[in-house]
Amino acid sequence: MEKSLKRSNIFLIVLSVILAIALVTFVVLYGISMSNQNRLKVDLENIYQRNYSELVDNINNSAIKLSKVAVSGENAYSRNLLNEISKNTAQATTNLSALPISINGISETIKFINQVSGYTQTLSNKLDRGENLTQQELETLKQLKDAFTTLKDKINDMSTKIYNGKIYDASVAFDGDFNKFTQILQNLKSKDVEYPAMIYDGPFSDSMVNKDIKNMNFSKVTSDVAKSEILDVFKDVDQNSVTYLGETNGHFKTYDFKLIAPSEHSMYVQVTQNGAKILTLSVGDFDDTQNYSLGTAEDIAIKFTNATGINEVKCVWSDVVGGDAYINLAPVENCVILYPDLVKVKVDLNSGRVVGFEASSYYTNHTKRSLKTPALSVQSAKDEVPSSLYVKETRLCLAPLEYNREILCYENICSHDGATYYVYVNATDGEIENILKVVETDNGSLLM
Amino acid sequence: MKKRKIFLFMLALFAILYSATFVLIDAFTNNEAIVITASQSENKQIQQRLKELGYYAGSIDGIIGSQSLKAIRNFQRDYGLTVDGIVGPKTLSALGLSSSTSYTSQDLYLLAKCVHAEARGEPYVGQVAVAAVILNRVDSPEFPNTISGVIYQPWAFTAVNDGQINLEPNDSAYSAAKDALNGWDPTYGCLYYYNPKTATSEWIWSRIPVVTIGEHVFAI
């Protein structure tokens, strides 16, 4: 009896010691964990504060420079200022997006700042080309100056509010959909700040977002007609495998279908509600085997594109990545390649089937164009290419330049130091419009 | 009997403390470092340049280890940049290595990671659509202007918030990201998507739905 009592006492003592050690370890680790957490919190707070300070600086600088542009009247000086405003505002957007703002809480302000960046860049480019600003543009700049001055005052007022509190704390306290920090920033756009509309063709302009569709003048069809169009193009697909999924009511209006290929891959096809044109096809296929050559794949792509009703296209670019061939086709009119109307096709080199098709650029841009006869000869175009480049081939094309501009160019495929460059020379005035470099990566070639 | 109770109580307490300690130890050892990933060739360029400038003495292996990180920090300090060890556009340009605004293979990797984290259970076209939404945001004035800016915008993607973004993307995610970069957009300009079964934000219901693909509703 006494012996067992002794033994249980020893047990209890040993257990107490272990428990005490465990308790001490726990407390120490908990302490370290908390101090780590605090350190990370301070680090995060510092990053937020840095971005906030930079945001205030960038808005302040933009406001001051906008006031200077309004009184400058000297093109060269204004051009530099506009350029700087564009950079300051672009940086302000970067600062804003690094802050813990609830998604879409202040989208109107971000949009405004982004558009000011695009607008001032466009005006700076205009002055660079030797043109003058119109009365309307000067008026808009004046309105921008007023809007920015109010924005600047508000943001400066707000800094006291935010510095009293912590951005981190304000960001984790939620009230409805938006956190407290977003709500403080939302005060930036109160009734007394008017954001003027900016009419221009440049980065972030409304005209870039709402592009017109030029080639969809067909009458509306039913989803049954769309389905029969699919069966017409995919002749080897079992019609029972075609499932109607619903509609897409975006920029393009489509009927969407799922079908099962003979290879048992499921395909997703979108057919336009107007005219039942196959607009996109997407298939998830990740086989790296290559049974077909790139040349055969190009033929398959052209045949498929013709079957969807798009004719007279030529392969203008192709590349093999993994087990797929990426092929770009473009219509050719009077020996001019129409790049804006590109059709993109992906062919699986294992099965020889089309596993991707994208014709929205074609239907957006393809229209009857009156192409001018080039003023420049092929030889003069070649002469415009920098002498360090060796010109391998020259062809005429309609190049889609930024902001919906289409320009008749000579496309010079050149080489230099083992790399390939595409140099676009304006066929009217001989100016170099763009230079692209082919960059080889592990994931195929990129045009940059 | 009383001793037995004390004994059991202490045993239970010990078990709790023991497991809690392990949770804490686990939290320390598994703390994932936030690494700004760049391709190995880009890293090699950075190391090469740092070596030329006398900041780095290690080997040019493309792996940013503690030695490279120290070199980057020292370089940033000397050149008046923010000393964060991250090679962003400013540090790159100070190193004389410019970063391009065009889409790079780094963008492809990041896009694939986001697609994998956000939509790995979705049909293939749903993955292309998620990648397309990210690219549509890059073009939209209402969002940041780079792929990384859009993906890492605070609270924009749940998979970025909970760290799933750091999972390695699979072939499907890569292929979907590539298709979207190549111009595929099954949503035709959508800027948002949500899963109607799990969406908690009331605000998202105010968006105009364009198409439903798999579990996601895509909206403008």
Image: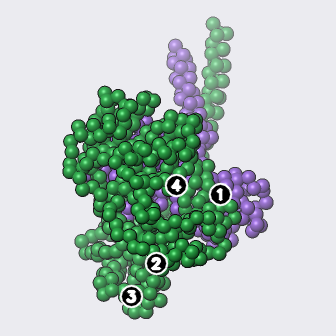
Residue drawn 37% across the image and 44% down it? A307
Q: To which quarter of the image does residue A129 belong?
A: bottom left
Q: Is residue B202 left or right of residue B60?
A: left
User: Which chain is green in the picture?
Assistant: A
> Considering the numbered disc 2 on the image, is that residue within a helix, a strand or a loop?
loop
Q: Give the residue type at disc 4.
A: Trp
The chain letter for the residue carrying disc 4 is A
Chain B: drawing colour:
purple
Rounded to the nearest angstrom, the CA distance separating label 3 from label 2 is 27 Å
Label number found at residue A206: none
Of circles 1 and 4, the one toward us is: 4
> Considering the numbered disc 4 on the image, is that residue within a helix, a strand or a loop?
strand
Nearer to me, A113 or B9: A113
Q: Are marks 2 and 4 on the same chain?
A: yes
Residue topped by disc 3:
A132
Rounded to the nearest angstrom, the CA distance separating label 1 from label 3 is 43 Å
Of circles 1 and 3, the one toward us is: 3
Q: Residue furthest front?
A: A334
> Disc 2, disc 4: CB below 8 Å?
no
Disc 4 crowd rating (10 Å Cα; few below 14, some 14-19, many 20+) is few
Q: Earlier in the sequence, mark 3 or mark 2?
A: 3
Residue drawn 59% across the image and 60% down it? A438
